Image: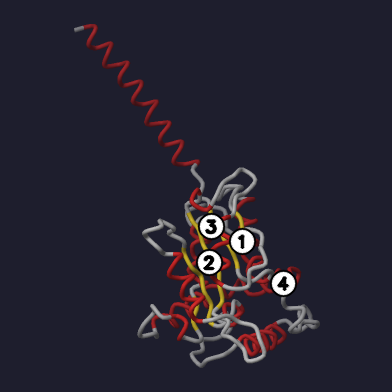
């Protein structure tokens, strides 16, 4: 009987150590995320500001990143960039828990630029290809990433192309802060420095943008054909994904 009692104590001690280790590991586990962007400046600069903050708060791993742009200017090229990328630790996209591509519809223009409906649709379809086990999330904007900026100001359902989106965003930003954005124009808006200013200015309105983006999607009869719906976007889903990393922490994200 004594031996059995001693054995029970040893078993209990081992169990307690195992349970403590499991609890500790759960508490210290951090998410990781990898993102590839079609845009070479605006969207990666914007998302890197969030990721940098999450890293500083140790809410995501140091491996989390917006990967370097490889020069691709079409959605399927962005998907391929993500699939072939390896970081300095030889870690590929399959090694990350959260993986995203950020692409624009960017309708083809008469004098060049933009890309085909087929390329846009193929990127979305192939990213979610279950046979290849890609399981990559897609944050798209129809027509361009700056639609996400515009949704911070108001809700709109009428079609608008990228040049007019930029004009509208510039006008709105100058109205709310004419001093900070006095030199803002279609050329300066796509710089890292300006993107940081925009990020900081729009942060208080982020919940409004999320609500407007969700409302747009809900207004569409067939969300499976995003190339037909201008304006529409799922950028908010990526932003929400990033925000969730800090949602259970006592330290505010920004």
In front: mark 3 or mark 1?
A: 3
Callout 3 touching callout 2 (CB < 8 Å): no
From the image, tell me which residue sits under label 4.
197
Quadrant in which the N terminus is drawn: top left
Q: How many angstroms separate mark 3 from mark 1 (CA)?
A: 23 Å
Dot label at residue 128: none
Q: How many angstroms separate mark 2 from mark 1 (CA)?
A: 9 Å
Badge 3 marks a residue whose secondary structure is: helix
* Residue that lies at the very extreme toward the top in this rendered image: 2
From the image, tell me which residue sits under label 2.
239
Mark 3 or 4, nearer chain start: 3
Q: How many angstroms separate mark 1 from mark 4 (CA)?
A: 13 Å
Question: In the rendered view, does 23 fall on the left or right side of 88?
Answer: left
Mark 2 or 1, nearer chain start: 1
Q: Give neighbour class at mark 2: few <14, some 14-19, many 20+ (Cα, 10 Å).
A: some
Question: In the rendered view, does 133 fall on the left or right side of 154?
Answer: left
């Amino acid at each position: 009987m004594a031996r059995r009692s001693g054995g029970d104590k040893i078993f209990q001690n081992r169990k307690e150590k195992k349970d403590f280790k499991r609890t500790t590991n759960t508490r210290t586990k951090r998410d990781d995320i990898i993102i590839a962007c079609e845009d070479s400046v605006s969207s990666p600069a914007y998302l890197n500001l969030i990721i940098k903050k999450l890293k500083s708060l140790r809410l995501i791993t140091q491996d989390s990143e917006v990967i370097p742009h490889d020069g691709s200017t079409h959605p399927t090229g962005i998907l391929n960039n993500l699939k072939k990328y390896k970081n300095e630790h030889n870690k590929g996209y399959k090694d990350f828990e959260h993986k995203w591509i950020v692409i624009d519809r960017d309708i083809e223009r008469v004098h060049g630029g933009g890309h085909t409906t087929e390329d846009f649709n193929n990127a979305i379809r192939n990213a979610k290809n279950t046979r290849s086990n890609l399981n990559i999330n897609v944050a798209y904007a129809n027509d361009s990433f700056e639609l996400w900026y515009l949704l911070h100001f108001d809700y709109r359902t009428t079609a608008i192309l990228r040049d007019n989106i930029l004009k509208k965003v510039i006008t709105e930003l100058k109205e709310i802060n004419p001093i900070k954005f006095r030199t803002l124009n279609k050329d300066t808006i796509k710089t890292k420095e300006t993107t940081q200013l925009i990020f900081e200015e729009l942060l208080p309105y982020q919940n409004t943008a999320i609500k407007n983006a969700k409302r747009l999607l809900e207004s569409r009869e067939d969300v499976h054909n995003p190339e037909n719906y201008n304006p529409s976007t799922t950028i908010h889903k990526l932003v929400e994904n990033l925000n969730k990393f800090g949602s259970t922490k006592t330290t505010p994200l920004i």
